[in-house]
Every structure is written in C-alpha cells, then in structure tokens.
Image: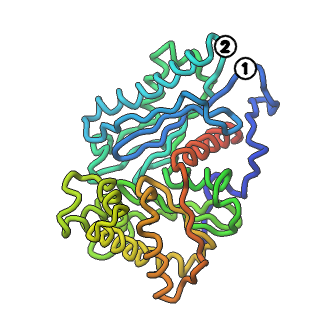
Amino acid sequence: MFRYSFWTTRPNPTILLLIDAKGELDFSMDRYAIVFDVGGTSIKAAVVRENGAIVEGATETFPSRGKEDRDTLLAHFYGLIAGRVEVLERLGEGRPFEVIGIGYAFPSPFDYDNGICYIQGQQKYDALYGTDMRAAMKERNAADPAVSRVLAADAPIVFDNDAALFAAGELYYGHAKKYHRSLCITIGTGTGSSFIDEQGIVKGKELWNDPFLDSNIDDYISQRGILRLAEAYGLGKDGAVKPIADAARAGIADARDVFARFGRMFGEMLAPYVDEFKPEAVIVGGNIARSADLFLGETREALIGRGIASPRVPAFETAEDTSASAFAGALALVQEFIRRPR
C-alpha cells in the first residue's frame, strides 16, 4: 500500500499562491522562499518567488564542507541563509520583502518531519549525525536581527529528500507532467529516488540502501560506483567523473567501456522496480545525469534483455537542471506547510 507525501494529488501550478493566515491572498510586499539543494560535494542556494520563479542573480553554489566538524558545518549552513538575505537586500534596493520560509532538499538518511540529520558513513555530514537542523537554524535566525526582521512570523524551516523534491519539481514543471507514472532517480555522490503515480509522489520509497550486488544501491549507482569501474582501467585517479566522460566523448575506448558497464549495471539495478512499478518514464537527474548520453543506451538494452522494457517504454528523460526542479519542490513544501491547519 503506497503512502503519499504532502503532494497528495497531482498539483496545478496555477494554484501555487501564498495564502496568509486569514486565508486571503496577500500582495502587499515581495515574498520569497530561501531554498537549498544540499549535495555531498556542494550546496546550491537560491531564492524563489511565491509563483515558483527563481530570482535572477540570487543563485550560487558553495562547497558543502561536508567533512568538517559539527560547529563549522552549522555555522556554514547558517551563513548560507544570511547570505541569501543579504542578496535580497541588495537586489531589492530598499523595497520591503518577507521570507516566507526556508526549504532544504537534503540527502538521506534524515528525519524530514522533525528536521534531524542521520547521515553517517557516507563521507559527508557525518558530524551532523543526530543534530536537530531545524532547531539549530531557528536559534541562529532568531539571534541575527538582519535575518529575523525579514522572516515571516512562524516561517517554517522544512526538509525533504533531495530526490523527492526533485521529483516534485519535475511533477509541477518538468518531464513528469506528461506521464501518469514515473520513476525519478538522482545520481551523484549517492542515489536518490522517488516514485510518482496517478495520485502524486509516493512516500517512503527510498532505494539508496536496498541490497545490490555485494553492498547497496548507493555504493554502485553513484559517483563512487563509476570510479570503482574506472579503477580497473587506471582511470579516475583524481576522484572526478567529468574527465572520464570527456575521454569517452573523445572516443577513448577504456572510458567508453566504463560508462557502458555503468549503464548495464544501472539497468540491472532498475530492473525489479521497473518490473513492479511499471513506470511510463524514468527521469534521471543529479550530476551524473550530465553523462547520461554515455550510459542510458546500455541501461535500456539491459532492461530489454530482461524482457521488462521495449525500445520506447519506459521513456528515459534527463533533467536539464536538477537543482531548479529541487528548488521548485522546496518552495512547494514551504507553501504546503504554511497552508496546513494549525
């Protein structure tokens, strides 16, 4: 039995309007959500208008500092909030504005309802294990007058799976709009996943820790999975995937073999989920999606070989901007929280 997240029905983007506490539309000032796409190596920060438009000039990418100690990480995360407020002050040229909430696309494992990080042993954010991120950021917001004065009363700080928010953005604005059933997969330093059916986004279907080969999906369908394959060819010694992709596109046989093997492995991983869920589309995002042209053909062939795909079904779609989709999903989560009965 599927459980659904806050998108309990398929959304209509035209109703993404901010409703004030009295249930009335409020256009008295510019209102924004500050949103973050938290990855293992970098954090993208942005400001989104209440209609879903990303504010030009307010999007930046910062190092994650994911291997730092707890205090350094919390100071870093708070500094990113304060930095977006400073950007709004500069871009607004003195016009009044309000921050309606702060939304995070954050990798698993994480208690999203309560804002507690449980990441451990993934070479990122280990020092935040057990930390109440919501409380930590609220405390710092309240202590900084420059931030607290522009925050709406009870402005929520909300979290969800980075892949779930990516899927939400795709459902509202991207590829998933045209399909009844989609499987969204993000591939980066780890693996994210979300399932979308006729009713909305399915809750609690995270695949990263499911068994795969001699470990789990996250170990293989990820940057380190590609680097493990590349090691056999003497490639990837700098720990980066892009040079391998560049070499593959330049026709270097060993580099092409790395991605071909990864594509087949991805197909093997997808097979049971495609067979059970029967998505009309598999939508691929994350940093590794930039190399999708090098491996998705092999992925489809692996599924066809198992008799659970055809040359066209499921369709494979690649997200042009994973973070933009996650930002839109984070805004939707903020707005949904605001609309909840209190």
Query: What's the mark number on residue 95?
Result: 2
Q: Residue at x 78, y 24 (%)?
A: 27
Query: What's the mark number on residue 283?
Result: none
Quarter that holds the N terminus: bottom right
Residue under circle 1?
29
Q: In which quarter of the image is residue 192?
A: bottom left
Label 1 secondary element: loop
Task: Locate residue 103, reporting x and y percent.
Answer: 54, 38
Q: Quadrant of residue 261?
A: bottom left
Left-right relation of 230 to 74: left
Say which amino acid is labelled 1.
Met
Say which amino acid is labelled 2.
Arg
Q: Residue at x 78, y 44 (%)?
A: 15
Marks 2/1 in contact by CB < 8 Å: the verdict is: yes
Left-right relation of 33 to 199: left
As drawn, which residue projects farthest toward the top?
94
Tally the marks. 2
Name the mark nearer the viewer: 2 or 1.
2
Task: Locate residue 341, reporting x and y percent.
Answer: 71, 40
Left-right relation of 336 to 215: right
Q: Which residue is drawn at 51% across and 43% down?
A: 159
